[in-house]
Image (cartoon, rainbow, N blue to C red):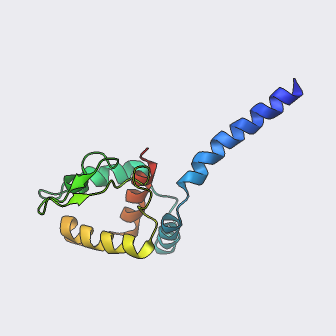
């Protein structure tokens, strides 16, 4: 009986640890550190807020305008019709792996959609959402 309990406990711990390890992202960790410096009261990013940010239209555009309602799907640029690979790392493992590339696209897309730079909080919330999509 003790062996069964120990094996069950081990499996439960592994089941909890795997999603936590999969969610780890050095770029998101960097945004987390920057957000804490900008706001000492910062606790963490919100995937729910990131999802709202993803789908909220500013004028006629939102992130979903090009990336579709699902970050797991391929999209098309709203004006050029160029194919865009899925945004979610679960569908496109190369996403959110290169910090300079992530910053380049945040800069470009935030300026195109919002007509301004995204805040660290917005970037972290957005990434938290997209990283959570499975």
Depth order, front residue of 134/54: 134
| Residue 10 coordinates in the image, percent (x, y) | 76, 38
Judge from the rendering whether residue 85 lies leftward or rightward of residue 6; answer left or right. Answer: left
Which image quarter: residue 94? bottom left
Quarter of the image with the C terminus is: top left
The residue at 76%/35% (across/down) is 9
The residue at 19%/68% (across/down) is 112
The number of numbered badges drawn on the structure is 0
| Residue 6 coordinates in the image, percent (x, y) | 82, 33
Judge from the rendering whether residue 118 lies leftward or rightward of residue 121; answer left or right. Answer: left
Quarter of the image with the N terminus is: top right
Judge from the rendering whether residue 100 lies leftward or rightward of residue 79; answer left or right. Answer: right
Which image quarter: residue 76? bottom left
Depth order, front residue of 95/8: 95
Depth order, front residue of 31/77: 77
| Residue 8 coordinates in the image, percent (x, y) | 75, 31
Which image quarter: residue 98? bottom left
Judge from the rendering whether residue 20 lies leftward or rightward of residue 94; answer left or right. Answer: right
Residue positioned most to the top: 1
Depth order, front residue of 28/46: 28
């Amino acid at each position: 009986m003790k062996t069964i309990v120990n094996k069950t406990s081990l499996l439960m711990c592994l089941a909890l640890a795997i999603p936590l390890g999969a969610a780890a992202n050095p770029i998101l960790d960097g945004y987390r550190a920057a957000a804490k410096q900008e706001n000492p009261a910062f606790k963490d990013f919100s995937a729910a807020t990131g999802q709202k940010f993803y789908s909220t239209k500013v004028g006629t555009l939102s992130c979903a305008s090009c990336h579709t309602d699902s970050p797991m799907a391929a999209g098309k640029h709203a004006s050029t019709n160029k194919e865009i690979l899925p945004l979610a790392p679960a569908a496109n493992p190369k996403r959110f792996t290169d910090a300079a590339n992530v910053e380049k696209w945040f800069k470009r897309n935030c300026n195109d959609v919002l007509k301004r730079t995204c805040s660290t909080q917005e970037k972290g919330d957005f990434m938290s959402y997209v990283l959570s999509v499975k």
